[in-house]
Image (cartoon, helix red, strand yellow):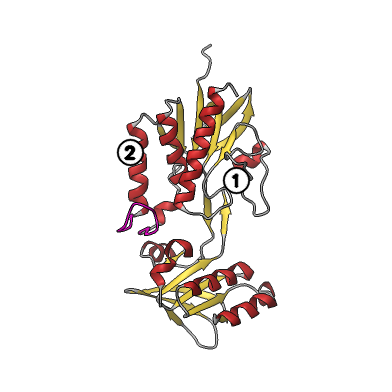
Amino acid sequence: MTEPKTYDCIVVGAGPAGLTAAIYLARFRRDFLVVESGASRATWIPLSRNHPGFPDGVRGKTLLGRMRRQAEQYGAQIRTGHVDALDPSDGGFRLIAAGEPLFARKVILATGVVDNEPPLPGVEEAIAKGLIRICPICDGYEVSGQSVGVIGDGAPAAAEAIFLTTWTDRVTLIHVGPPQDLPEDSRRDLAAAGVELVEASVDSVVLDRRRIAALCFGPDGPRKFDSVYSALGVTPRTRLAIDTGARLDDGGRLFVGDHQETSVPGLYAAGDVVRGLNQISTAEGEGAIAATDVHNALRMGR
């Protein structure tokens, strides 16, 4: 019976973190595989203007396409499919991808997060047009001076609304949760920052050329904004890591050390699944760190 192939490393995910890891591993001449499901949230980015090296901005899909070509140029193998299981096995790991068992000495998880978007008709179209936004650090500059609505719940949503006053003094928090979810200190902070608070449910998203209307059931009726931010948080894709016993931090993301290794030896994580800025540039850096540590560990027999 033929022994199953064991890769040096398997990278799960092909967003900015996973593809950067792939570029590095390929240039380290490692025998590795990337398995990706095509679910990178970077594909939602209509135009990133804060990524270094692109003064005119770059579309998320364009950036991922270039990174993929670069990795494949150096020999990276990228397979489409879902990884359904991950278990430590004989000094390495056993994965099940599309029903097929795969084996690797090291694994890098670049599985990202899922945005908790408002369950409203028209949301995906609005995101594609840059009218519903999910990252103030990424594109807050583009709403300078605009009328901005923030849909969210609780103190984190209040903090995001206040953060947006960096660029505009026309910010409204549409608080869609129960009133008790918004602490009194958050209410005071909103008032001090000049952020209007509307406590109402949002029924629909209506696109009107370059403007967006969020229909609120409040005393003022429908409200129209230039841009709307969703501040409903994210859900980290940590299930595979949890199955191995990997430790999570207080925010539910994967806990890693200085070289991106999780609490499970040989299992690494990079990108949004790890606590950080949720930025393309930081994900790329973490992917590079993880891949380099994988190479060095294998080189030294660890």
Tell me which label, 1 or 2, sits earlier in the chain.
2
Q: Residue at x 51, y 72 (%)?
A: 150
Q: Is residue 64 visible?
A: yes
**What residue sits right under mark 1 in the picture?**
238
Give 161 or 87, whichever is nearer the viewer.
Answer: 161
- Distance Cα–Cα, label 1 vs label 2: 27 Å
**What residue sits right under mark 2 in the picture?**
69
Amino acid type at image mark 2: Arg
Which label lies toward us, 1 or 2?
A: 2
Q: Residues within 10 Å of mark 2 (few under 14, many from 20)?
A: some
Verify whether residue 246 appears in magenta.
Answer: no
Looking at the rendered structure, the secondary structure element under dot 1 is loop
Amino acid type at image mark 1: Thr
Give 78 or 162, whichever is nearer the viewer.
Answer: 162
Q: Is residue 21 above or below residue 180?
A: above
Percent position of residue 139, x then y: 42, 64
Percent position of residue 132, x then y: 43, 67
Q: Residues within 10 Å of mark 1 (few under 14, many from 20)?
A: many
Percent position of residue 35, x then y: 46, 36
Q: Is residue 100 visible?
A: no
Over which residues does the magenta segment extend? 47-58
